[in-house]
Amino acid sequence: MTITQEAIVPKFDDDTETDRKLAIICSKGNLDMAYPGLILGNAALGEGVETHLFFTFWGFDMITKSRMHDLKFTPVGNTATHMPMGITPFPGVTGMATHQLKKSIADLGVPEVPEFLDQIVAAGGHLWACRLSADMNHLTDADLYDGVEGIISASDFIELTNGAQLLFI
Amino acid sequence: MPLTTMNGREIHVNDEGFLTEYDEWDEDLAKVLAKNIDIDLTDEHWRVLRFLRDDFKSQGETATTRRVQTVGGIPTKEQFTLFPKKPAKKMAYIAGLPKPHGCV
């Protein structure tokens, strides 16, 4: 047992300004693939890291008001579910799998996608929508989740995240 | 496990400085812990700390920022204002609890 007179104070390392930045590109619109970016982004914010999420291609569903509440999970083609692949395309299987995944996530106290975005924005996270995806889907700011700061081009995003660590999901 | 002296008595902490004994904490000690990391405790801070203490007692683990929001009723934004940059760890430290293990 060590005896020390000095108070041991955790090093939160937040007195010096850090330039650590994290950029996460969310390119998937499946329910299961929406979560990695949200969880890691939220964790980074909790560690005081400036965090930007860029939603592109299928990932656009995560911030599209009409779709964000209704992302799905399918076992089709996903061998990691360990279901016999022959039955996965049957009607109702995707619905059942989605329901089950939502339940498992809720049981852990993890919010659904829209509420998770609320939490990320409240924690100071920045959400950006991809210009090309918006144009392809004929969507404007009005169609997107309110916390999205803007529809920006790929170059804008690259410029904005100068020096950031990057995750592509 | 190191022993450290705070507020005129010996306190068990881990290598990082987080308290390891739930019962060694009291509100006077919280003031010292808060001062160690440059936080002035207000009523709003106390609301968070008391929730964390009670929740740990019933759950056996430290609440995450998510839980402090949904169960404790303290909005995420407010948590970041009260305990800047790293709310989860700072709240736990001042409340004399381990760092939360949960991811969300």
Image (cartoon, coloured by chain):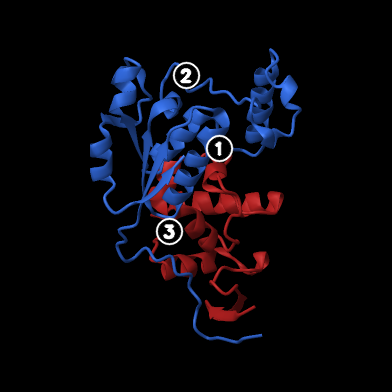
Chain colours: A blue, B red
- Closer to the eye: label 3 or 1: 1
Q: Residues within 10 Å of mark 1 (few under 14, many from 20)?
A: some
Chain designation of label 2: A
Instruction: Provide the residue designation for mark 1.
Output: B70
Q: Residues within 10 Å of mark 3 (few under 14, many from 20)?
A: some
Using the rendered view, name the quadrant where residue A152 is placed.
top left
Instruction: Provide the residue designation for mark 3.
Output: B41
Secondary structure beneath dot 1 equals helix
Image height check: is B68 above or below A106? below
Instruction: Provide the residue designation for mark 2.
Output: A67
- Residue at the extreme top: A91
Q: Position of residue A61 (x, y in %)?
A: 44, 24
- Residue at the extreme right: A84
Q: Residue at point 60% right, 26% down?
A: A73
Q: CA distance from mark 3 to mark 2?
A: 43 Å
**Cβ atoms under marks 3 and 1 closer than 8 Å:** no
Q: Residue at point 38% right, 30% down?
A: A56
Quarter the N terminus of chain B occupies: bottom right
User: Does the rendering let one see residue B74?
Assistant: no
Secondary structure beneath dot 2 equals loop
State the count of labels: 3
**Cβ atoms under marks 2 and 1 closer than 8 Å:** no
Q: CA distance from mark 2 to mark 1?
A: 24 Å
Task: Name which residue type carries label 1.
Answer: Thr
Q: Position of residue B97 (x, y in %)?
A: 60, 61
